[in-house]
Amino acid sequence: MRAVVYKGPFEVAVEQVEDPRIQHPSDVIVRVTSTAICGSDLHMYEGRTAAEPGIVFGHENLGVIEETGDGVTSLSRGDRVVMPFNVACGFCKNCTAGYTGFCLTVNPGFAGGAYGYVAMGPFTGGQAEYVRVPYADFNCLKLPEGTEMETDFVLLADIFPTGYHGNELADVRPGESVAVYGGGPVGLMAAYSAMLRGASKVFVVDRVAERLQKAAEIGAVPIDFTAGNAAEQIKEQTAGQGTDKGIDAVGYQAQAQARGEDREEPATVLNSLVETVRPTGALGVPGLYVPSDPGGPDEQARQGMLVVAIGRLFEKGLRMGTGQCNVKRYNRQLRDLIIEGRAKPSFVVSHELPLDQAPTAYEKFDKRVEGYTKVVLHPHA
Ligand SMILES: NC(=O)c1ccc[n+]([C@@H]2O[C@H](COP(=O)([O-])OP(=O)(O)OC[C@H]3O[C@@H](n4cnc5c(N)ncnc54)[C@H](O)[C@@H]3O)[C@@H](O)[C@H]2O)c1
Ligand SMILES: [Zn+2]
Ligand SMILES: [Zn+2]
């Protein structure tokens, strides 16, 4: 089959790889109809992780079941399903507590597994014609038959639940104000989820015009960090107090905020959030931080150690939640919001392309040019 293969920094290719096959009675094989490119893929694409060439990318996968293992009970050939980016067993201590992003058995020696991702286990990615899904009864979420709302449902694999998770980590409640740093797909989903949860005022901070435009379209207040200190801009619009809650949807590859500078400053968003959120507030951090970054700007950053204003954080009594999203905790409810017409997350999708165009799509999404906000690939188009 054809698949998107990582060749080295800033290079992916669509190549022939081995077809997946059932390896265990609880597996299914899914014929992938939609698979999205994620900001998390870009960390590997840019050579900013320990990823080695040869990985098949793709953890945001939706498709139709092609084949089921003998032990699969709730799924049949022909079912349309979307899979959390997490691979989880369903029976370990963390899975049974709902922390499926930290499964203890699928990737021995590490808490958490995912498709097509460095350090997340041997699970081949789904930016391909087919993908193998382990523990399929647990990991597949059934969708209505047909092809409707495909670009809404594919976002259930990661970014819609992840944006929602940012709100859960920050404990966003009705009537609160929320500052979201990052207007990429995750940030836009975090802002959208904040509104679904009844937030009164939501800010989205970025510098990419098309992304700030999308934020404004859903009713958020866009903040361009190149136009002046973001925390100050937000405080001016919250009676000088700052927001109740804050979400980091950027992560360690954050751009320095000074005007005209083009360099990374890994802790800048965390430190801005400490300033932006009012005393006793909370921060949700779905933006990714890594324990080792070969391209970090200094020796400490290369070991995942950042200079964060812990003193101010303590002084303000702020609390902070982090980590991979436990997608399964939210995907069923978010699916039902889509089915009932109460949520339409596909407003973030800017491009739908055949698999063969993955190399161009990666390049443009990575440069955040030409309105590339979220790309959905269709392997069988
Ligand atoms: N926790 C999880 O489960 C999970 C899941 C998916 C993605 N992620 C992570 O979430 C982050 C965002 O993902 P994405 O797909 O939206 O990626 P993205 O790279 O498209 O979006 C990041 C956005 O942040 C903006 N940005 C850069 N520096 C900034 C700054 N100083 N202040 C404000 N905005 C700034 C960029 O312009 C960009 O639009 C990534 O780190 C990704 O790895 C985490
Ligand atoms: Zn993703
Ligand atoms: Zn588990």
Image (cartoon, grey):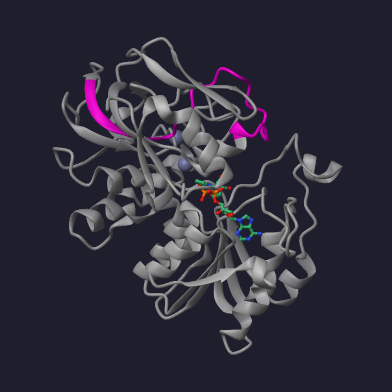
State the residue lying farthest toward the right. Answer: 299
State the residue lying farthest toward the front. Answer: 370
Q: Residue 158: percent from the left, percent from the top? A: 42, 45
Q: Is residue 28 above or below residue 286?
A: above
Left or right: 121 in relation to 151: right
Asked if residue 62 lies in the magenta stretch, the reply is yes
In-front residue for pair 46/85: 46
In-front residue for pair 349/84: 349
Number of callouts in the render? 0
State the residue lying farthest toward the bottom. Answer: 239
Asked if residue 319 lies in the magenta stretch, the reply is no
Residue at screen point 45% across, 64% down: 213
Q: Is residue 160 visible?
A: yes
Q: Residue 320: percent from the left, percent from the top? A: 61, 62
Q: Is residue 115 visible?
A: no
Q: Is residue 60 above or below residue 211?
A: above
Q: Quarter containing ligand 3?
A: top left
Left or right: 202 in relation to 7: left
Q: Quadrant of residue 67 in the image?
A: top left
Residue at screen point 84% across, 44% down: 298
Q: Quadrant of residue 100 in the image?
A: top left
Q: Residue 263: percent from the left, percent from the top? A: 75, 51
Q: Is residue 139 above or below residue 4?
A: below
Q: Name the quadrant of the C terminus.
A: top left
Q: Residue 281: percent from the left, percent from the top? A: 59, 75
Q: Which residues are magenta?
A: 44-66
- Magenta segment's dominant SS is loop
Left or right: 248 in relation to 97: right
Q: Name the quadrant of the N terminus.
A: top left
Residue at screen point 68% across, 61% down: 270
Q: Is residue 241 above or below residue 128?
A: below
